Amino acid sequence: MSKSIEVNNLNVYYGNFLAVEGVSMEIAPRSVTAFIGPSGCGKSTFLRTLNRMHEVIPGAHVEGDVLMDGDNLYGPGVDPVLVRRQVGMVFQRPNPFPTMSIKDNVLAGVRLNNKRISKSDADDLVEKSLKGANLWNEVRDRLDKPGAGLSGGQQQRLCIARAIAVSPQVLLMDEPCSALDPISTYAIEELIEELKSDYTIVIVTHNMQQASRVSDRTAFFNIAGTGKPGKLIEYNDTKAIFTTPNVQATEDYVSGRFG
Ligand SMILES: Nc1ncnc2c1ncn2[C@@H]1O[C@H](COP(=O)(O)OP(=O)(O)O)[C@@H](O)[C@H]1O
Ligand SMILES: [Mg+2]
């Protein structure tokens, strides 16, 4: 169920502003790819184009192609709602529905998709998704309690459970640990390692150690200055990016000598 991604010469605009220019990359199924680079270089912008989430921002649009297992996400007649069902997203701040129960949070995406689901199927899906997100043992006794009662790290795993409940093929994560303490961060990193066997995962992170711990491949993005578009500078095996980068700017960034 995990899919490959191929991006061909993608430009991303907010109205007339070219925010990201000329990105091409291939991402293998069942792999973790990290996006790194300074603030404002377009990591989030580019990530959102991988499930057409940018289209909720008026005026945002792309030129170029994004293929999933060869199918163009931007092809004529492709429904962005269907795309987002196949390509799930987890955000920087855990965003469970606060008053909704843990169980209903897990099912929220499935219900949004208008899927009718029997009570026993729903219970099975809740258990499977929470197990998949490594949260089941911590919440199995309080599935009917509000999602807001969980710790930040648990809430983020709840959001991951909600994302995987709709059986996506790709999971996008935009700095999923930036609001979490180190122990919760470790739990999410362990989870990413496990989810990799079923999903294609792309994660934006500001944490170099995290990129080197969790990812197989790393993409370094950079920006030449304010108002200039972000660009993909170097994309390679994570080990190569962190030990033997080909571009000076990559080396400066990963070694903390940025600027
Ligand atoms: N909703 C938006 N509307 C207009 N410009 C935006 C929007 N979101 C981001 N940008 C601009 O796009 C560029 C890239 O931003 P972003 O993708 O958030 O970078 P990063 O995630 O790498 O920090 C920045 O110049 C930013 O100001
Ligand atoms: Mg960002």
Image (cartoon, rainbow, N blue to C red):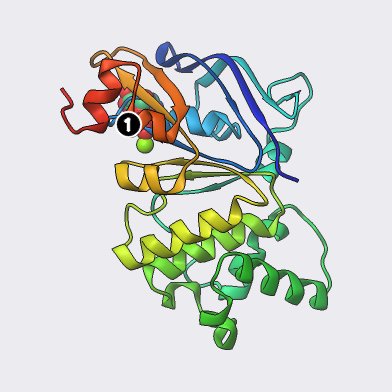
Residue 64 at what x, y percent from top left? 60, 13
Quarter residue 130 falls in: bottom right
174 over 257 or under it: above or below: below
123 over 61 or under it: above or below: below
Q: Is residue 196 visible?
A: yes
Residue type of the residue flagged with mark 1: Thr
In front of the other: 30 or 16? 30
Q: Which residue is mark 1?
A: 243
- Name the quadrant of the C terminus: top left
Classify the position of ligand 1 by quadrant: top left, top right, bottom left or bottom right. Answer: top left
User: How many C-alpha atoms fall within 10 Å of the one at disc 1: few (<14), some, or many (≥20)?
Assistant: few
Residue found at x 27% / y 32%: 254
Residue 10 at what x, y percent from top left? 54, 15
Query: What secondary structure is found at the residue carrying circle 1?
Result: helix
Q: Is residue 95 visible?
A: no
196 over 40 or under it: above or below: below
